[in-house]
């Protein structure tokens, strides 16, 4: 009886240990399967992360391309406006050149008339600085035939001559030159006060003459006027301070 009981107990223990071994194997298999699942999930997540990074890179590239496209579109619009403006400027310049050519055709005859006018004026004017003024007008005649001088420069020289002639009427001046009186050529000091008075005095200050522009000749001055004429010449040469002087002036009728 005892032997049967021991055998039964031994069999029961053996079954128990066999069940434990089977359970242990199942757990091990479950752990392996879980590890495999975990590893597969990790690999899958890594793949997902890699794809996400690639997507982010592609999205960044796309946004940069969009920005570049917008920038290029704005630049192209800007260049198109510049080209259009250059076309308008070119057309405007072409019209201006055509206008300048037409203007030049009208300006050149005008310049010749202006030179003739100032030439005639100097010839009938009070003859102070006669050589200087004649040379200036001759220069205007000469420059009109110079191909290397622009029309604008020619016109400027003509206007400058007019300006100089205009300034003569508002200032006094004195210079030394020669004067022919009764067949005798004398060295004299000339004095002019605008265009209202033009006189000459011998270097010894004993004789003087005043110009009569209507008669186009010289008239002798009185000896009592020599002192004032000497003072006028000194004032014009800035050799004395301004002072009141009495000089013969032809009054307009």
Image (cartoon, helix red, strand yellow):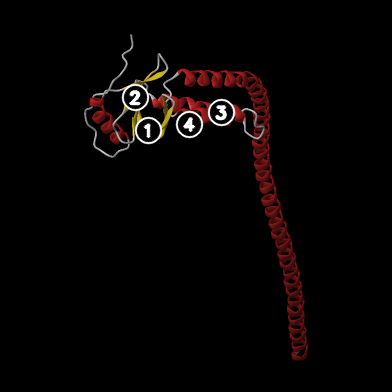
Report if the CB atoms under discs 1 and 3 are less than 8 Å apart.
Answer: no
x then y, percent, for residue 76: 68, 38
Which residue is identified by label 2?
Answer: 209
Q: Is residue 14 above or below residue 118?
A: below
Circle 4: element type? helix
Q: Which mark is residue 132?
A: 4
Dot 3 corresponds to which residue? Answer: 138
Viewer-proximal residue, 246 or 182? 182
Is label 2 in contact with label 1 (beta carbons under 8 Å)?
A: yes
Q: Quadrant of residue 101?
A: top right
The image quadrant where one finds the N terminus is bottom right
Residue at the spot 57% in from the left edge and 31% down from the top edge: 153
Q: Is 31 placed left or right of 221 in the picture? A: right
Mark toward the viewer: 2 or 3: 2
Among the 4 quarters of the image, the one containing residue 163: top left
Q: Position of residue 157 (x, y in %)?
A: 53, 30
- Few, some or many C-alpha atoms within 10 Å of disc 1 (few <14, some 14-19, many ≥20)? many
């Amino acid at each position: 009886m005892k032997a049967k009981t021991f055998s039964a107990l031994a069999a029961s223990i053996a079954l128990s240990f066999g069940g434990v071994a089977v359970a242990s194997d199942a757990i091990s298999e479950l752990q392996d399967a879980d590890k495999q699942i975990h590893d597969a999930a990790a690999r899958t997540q890594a793949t997902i992360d890699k794809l996400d990074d690639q997507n982010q890179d592609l999205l960044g590239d796309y946004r940069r391309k969009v920005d570049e496209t917008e920038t290029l579109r704005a630049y192209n619009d800007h260049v198109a406006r510049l080209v259009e403006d250059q076309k308008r400027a070119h057309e405007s310049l072409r019209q201006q050149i055509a206008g300048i050519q037409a203007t030049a055709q009208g300006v050149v005859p005008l310049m010749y008339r202006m030179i003739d006018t100032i030439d005639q004026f100097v010839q009938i004017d009070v003859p102070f600085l006669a050589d200087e003024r004649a040379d200036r007008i001759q220069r205007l005649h000469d420059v009109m035939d110079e191909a290397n001088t622009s029309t604008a420069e020619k016109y400027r020289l003509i206007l400058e001559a007019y300006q100089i002639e205009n300034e003569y009427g508002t200032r006094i001046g004195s210079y030394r030159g020669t004067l022919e009186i009764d067949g005798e050529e004398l060295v004299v000091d000339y004095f002019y006060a605008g265009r209202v008075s033009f006189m000459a005095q011998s270097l010894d200050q004993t004789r003087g003459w005043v110009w009569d522009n209507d008669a186009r000749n010289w008239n002798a001055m009185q000896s009592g006027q020599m002192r004032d004429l000497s003072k006028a010449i000194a004032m014009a040469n800035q050799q004395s301070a301004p002072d009141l002087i009495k000089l013969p002036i032809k009054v307009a009728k």
